[in-house]
Amino acid sequence: MDFSYTADEISFRKRLNEFLDKEMNEEIARQNWEDMGVGREAREFSLKLAAYGFLGMGWPTEYGGKGLGPTYDFILLDELGKRWGAHVPLDVGYTMVGPTILRRGSEELKKEFLPRIIGGEIEFCLGYTEPNAGSDLAALIMEAVEDGDAYVISGQKTFNTECHYAEYHWLAARTDLSPEAARHKSITLFVVDMNSPGVTVRPMKTMSGELTNEVFYDKVRVPKRRIVGETNKGFYYVMEAIASERNQVFIPARLMPILNELVRYVKETHLNGKPLSEDALIRDKLAQAVIELEVAGVLADHSRWLESNHMPLTYEPEVTKIFVSEAEQRLAATAMDILGLYSQLMEGSPRVPIRGRISWEFLHAFMTTLGGGTSEVGRSVIAQRGLGLPRSF
Amino acid sequence: MDFIITKEQLRMQKAAREMLKAKCTNEFVWEMEKDAKGCTPEFWRKMGELDWMALIIPEEYEGVGAGFFDLVLMMEELGRACAPGPFFSTVVLGGLSLIEFGTPAMKHELLPKIAKADIAMTLALTEPQTTQWAPYLISTTATARGDGYVINGIKLFVPDAHVADHFICAARTSGNPADKHGITLFRVGAKKPGIGLQPLQTIAGDKQFEVAFADVSVPSADIVGELNKGGEHLDTILQYAAICKCAEMMGGAARVLEMSAAYAKERTQFGKPIGSFQAVQHHCANMLIDLEGSRYITYKAAWMLGEKIPCAREVSVAKAWVSDMYRKVTALGHQVQGGSAFMEEHEMPLFSRRAAAAAVAFGDAKYHRSLVAQALGL
């Protein structure tokens, strides 16, 4: 057992923080996380992050990486998260698509995409969910029909985050249309250029203001060389990717800025002549939030350690995902309680506390237990894979 | 960073588990709860023969010289088996206090005896002035007289006082009752005149006592650590104790989950194993989530304590979380296993009753959250 970091890891963290002190700001953090569209600032930041060598530490050298372990990427995600909950600006490509291409993609796909992902140049958007395929992803019906050296794809996706600015769609579509085909064994993953003729993106706005999208495919031609891995194995690649994706997306450190803002707020805000920080209930609630973030931290550390050492991930990333997402909701509720009457004020309002970040976070947090798989599906996965209980669905 | 439990550590855990499975059956635990002594000489000797008491005693005192983390792994197994007897009191409260703060003479006298399972020890700390955990609220006095001290006062919730050969007793040598400064720790022979015991009836069926000290004289040579510095010493001792208690709770919770999952697979209703129902699955998943968090938060604090990295905050985080966790996990264990687990002789109540006791031992969740709030600068 050893919870320490190596000297190299510590010095990487130090260099990174010196860089972030200069280059990172709240605007950049929000451009990515709130999905308003990664704008000029976040794109420039992404390129700088790459130029200074902070991207791709754990990726193979032949595709532009430095061939060290994934620990460095986790340090990167933690340190970004501590600053306004930031993420790698082009995070879908970096944390979800890239690793899957690396694991399953053809040499051609690797050469084409990996150096540009590590270069912080391109972004992908996930194309899994459909109106009738949410938790039950294998129910998707978007069709891809073989036609010479291409597939012709038609249908509709929904809740496809980042499609309004990403360059490529990471698309799951059904390629074996025969009636006897098993639904898990007839889905293929494609990389689709978002500029392809026949692709229409219609943004939808969430209750907390983020954009997500409906995406319509009308006879879109996608060349066969843009198939990821083997045809009809896409469902399994997606499931495989979800485990490591959990480790890269549900970052406990991202909640620390909220906690720090609250600590500052309760010290500075007075009620009946006393700072809120002397209120026993508030102290108890904030301490509980710290405890939950610490627990989330060790759960994530353990799951990351398994991944870093190529040990099988079964239920562990799901535990992290559920714990972090629910801790986020509890933290948001605590924050709203502390702000009291002022909790209802939104960004831009006179007298809004903490720049409106708390009311935004409260609204945003409804998504955390839904996005990327609901807590209900997750708990059944834990019960079945972690404890060997029989299947419930 | 690594989460490796070494082969040697795994071997130790496995051996402990096998011995406890054979010798520490539910019936035995249940019998020992009702027994006035609470442990048999055979069981205590058996643990001694396997060097469990010697585990963390340094080699120069005829111990094994293992690290604190090894002890934590051992406590996990003891918690899993609800092992009866004064192991915790002797090794954690007595042994670690002496290893950290004992005089050379005390160590030479007592540590080899602990290692050989020849003596039992305990800590006399809590007093009746408050119903809440308050380790510095000491009004038991130690008054200088001649070349020693005379101790007067009442201690509560003293575990295993009836079998202890020596107490570590916290008494006030200066200052006011709630002051951290001015507390001194004394080694007090349990058979000294003036010591009176009264057993408490507890929810976990463990053996705890009210201990009255009436004009008990002790020589100055029996001061453990420094005069008036007992408050600081207690901080260290109680950090070890809290984490060992977390390990015990985590071991117990692991067994509760194992039992509940096995039951959910076996028990059939509506023509299906109840474990195929999502409601039951989610109870089990919640138990696993809470257990995993408890495991690694305990390991982290245990590792820091073993490495002597300051970790008061991490210890409080762990004790607060694990105390709440154990009660939640046992409650869910009952819910999954239904009416049969509500029966007195079922294995389940052994754990749910211990969860209630462990939650308040060495500071409950609320107390430790108050320390975390302080560490946060509030």
Image (tube, coloured by chain):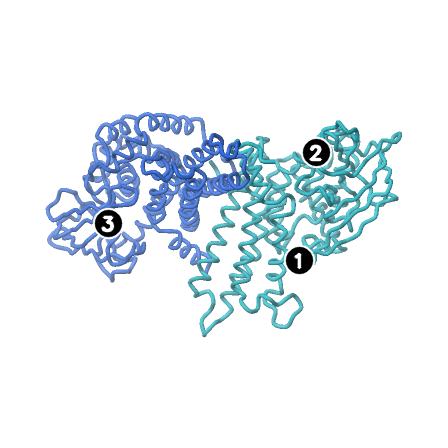
The amino acid pointed to by label 1 is: Asn
Per the image, the residue denoted by label 2 is A235
| Chain that is coloured blue in the picture | B
| Chain that is coloured cyan in the picture | A
Q: Residues within 10 Å of mark 2 (few under 14, many from 20)?
A: many
Q: In percent of the image, x 56 and y 43: which residue is there?
A: A320
Q: Residues within 10 Å of mark 1 (few under 14, many from 20)?
A: some
**Where is B290 relative to A306, above or below?**
below
Q: Earlier in the sequence, mark 1 or mark 2?
A: 1
Can you see residue A393?
A: yes
- How far apart are the two marked residues, 1 and 2, measured between alpha carbons? 38 Å
Residue closest to the eye, B219 or A265: A265
- How far apart are the two marked residues, 2 and 3, measured between alpha carbons? 65 Å
The answer to whether tags 3 and 1 share a subunit is no
- The chain to which mark 1 is attached is A
- The chain to which mark 2 is attached is A
Tell me if A153 is positioned left or right of B87 in this view: right
The amino acid pointed to by label 2 is: Phe
How far across and down, in percent of the image, does residue B366 sit?
A: 39, 55
Farthest residue in the front direction?
B270
Is disc 3 placed on a helix, strand or loop? strand
Per the image, the residue denoted by label 1 is A25
The quadrant in which residue A230 appears is top right
Per the image, the residue denoted by label 3 is B185
How far across and down, in percent of the image, does residue B26 sit?
A: 32, 32
* Contact flag, marks 3 and 1 (Cβ < 8 Å): no
The quadrant in which residue B37 appears is top left
Tell me if B256 is positioned left or right of A85 in this view: left
Work out which quarter of the rendered image holds the C terminus of chain B and state it.
bottom left
The amino acid pointed to by label 3 is: Leu
Is disc 1 placed on a helix, strand or loop? loop
